Image (tube, grey):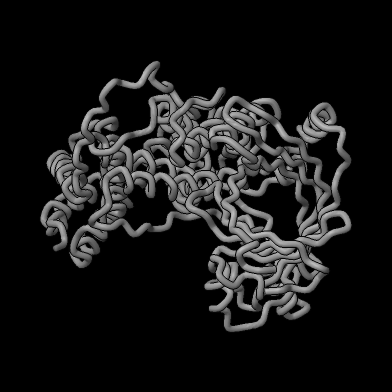
Amino acid sequence: MPAADLLPMVEQELKFSVPWAARKAVAGQFVSLSSAPRMHLRAVYFDTPDRQLARQRAAIRLRQEGRKWVQTFKMAGADAMSRVELNHPSPGRTLDLSVYAGTPAEAVLAGLTAELGVRYETDVWRKAAAVRTRAGSVEVAYDVGTIRAQGLELPVCELEFELLSGRPQALFIVAGRWLARHGLVLDLRSKAERGDGLANAAARIAAAPLDERPQVREAEIAAFWAPRFATGIGLGRDETPDQALAAMTAECFEQIARNAAPLAAADAPPGVRLGGAEHVHQLRVGMRRLRSAWKLLDGNADLPPAGLQDGARRHFADFGRVRDQDVMGGEVLSALVDAGMPPLTWQPQGGTDAATLASSVDFQSWLLGLLAWNVGIREPAPGLPMAGGLPAAEPAVAPEPARPVRLARAVTPRLRKWHGRLVREGRHFVRLEDERRHALRKLAKRLRYGLAWSAPLYRAARVRAYRKKLAALQDILGEINDLVVARTHYASLADAHSQAWFALGWIAARLRELEVQAEAAFGVLAEVKVPWKARR
């Protein structure tokens, strides 16, 4: 096929896992939408042995759709819901790479240094229907099946919403309705990403000695659902605050959503947990980084609407209560036992658990609304926390846009202000009340994340030195915060359990030590050279 006939297409779609409890209802809704039969889709995915395509966030497959075969190349697009896709008919299970001459795929494939081979395959049954809205038309596809790689299998049960025509807002309108009705869970992992992970796990299990394979298999399963940690982004000095905020929000969104999906465990049978305490912690890190980015650029960039900001604050607090329980049952309890506390069965306080929070329609709608805002959708979609709407009428003369402030000029005054307040109040840490100490801890975190975002703007050596001192301070403040939470817990048990008095005495002594250490660490931070001077 001539390259001119193989036009690249930007595919825009949203993908959700369907919880077990909702699968019957989802299948039933399709019956009312379309009488078309299900289609059997079987695909094989290719890559080099060292995953050169996957490392470039690309994939190539051959898929049998009924009686025909289609060859598809995909690569990452501009945002979390976009993919660059090239399709062409194929005579069978043989790749034809010549069709990619003159296309975006050519450069990716030309750089491969090893031969392509089958890495994994998918086998799904699809039921699809088109849904029209005032903003455009969306295909809703319900996929049920399996991903396979060298004897390992992963079940698939997901809904895909793909924009057929119209504005991207249509995707969020339709997806938001289905989410509200069925309690769907946003999942950023494509079948290719999951298949690649499964193939990696299968290869490492196969390479292990026979007597070690059960342990290796268990470790690989844990690694497959591992928490998603923060990653840096390379902000440039010439970026505008709005561009920087979009990049920051996209990174935080990925960290939040990719930790929420295992916590929600929509892929697992009832009662099976895929995420744990570290997923909760990393989800909250993503939310704190996000809120820090908003505070850093407030006044110099257009922030999300009030509904999204309020949701971030509320969900952060909800997951914080779960995090406190995890710390109580882990680090603090271990320290008390090591110190000689008599046995005292720890019972978590009542409340909503992480899986329920992560899978809730409220939280998932907030995630979807955040994605919509960050890809530029300003029209509110029903059910999503996007306050406000389009103006009733456009002004007769549009105002002259203000010249954007350079990024360093936008963030430096704020970092300087946060640092000044932190060291000024921290010099008297021993005399501060718990509430004031907690506020300083939050300010220290905000400063840490603000500097992490802004690090490319300043001298690297000074940034490293400052962050080292700030991290040492944060370690102390974090332990103080955990002990204050524990103190409240054990005080509530003291009347019924005499062992709690041991805990309260040990906590009080440890807090006195840490208070002195914290005040000294604030003094050290005050003396370190700050990196605020922008790099020339």
Residue 265: x and y in percent read: 67, 44
Judge by depth and name the residue closer to the eye, 353 or 312: 312
- Residue 391 sits in which quadrant? top left
- Quadrant location, the N terminus: bottom right
Horizontal arrangement in the rendering, residue 452 relative to residue 312 (left or right): left
Q: Compared to 255, does 320 lie above or below?
A: above
- Residue 173 sits in which quadrant? top right
Image mark count:
0
Judge by depth and name the residue closer to the eye, 471 or 63: 63
**Which residue shows up at 49% across the image and 25% down it?**
380
**Which residue shows up at 78% across the image and 40% down it?**
128
Would you say residue 347 is visible in this rendering?
Answer: no
**Which residue shows up at 12% across the image and 41% down it?**
424
- Residue 308 sits in which quadrant? top left
Judge by depth and name the residue closer to the eye, 159 or 129: 129
Would you say residue 128 is visible in this rendering?
Answer: yes
Residue 340: x and y in percent read: 47, 50
Residue 167: x and y in percent read: 54, 35
Horizontal arrangement in the rendering, residue 11 relative to residue 211 (left or right): left
Q: Compared to 194, does 98 lie above or below?
A: below
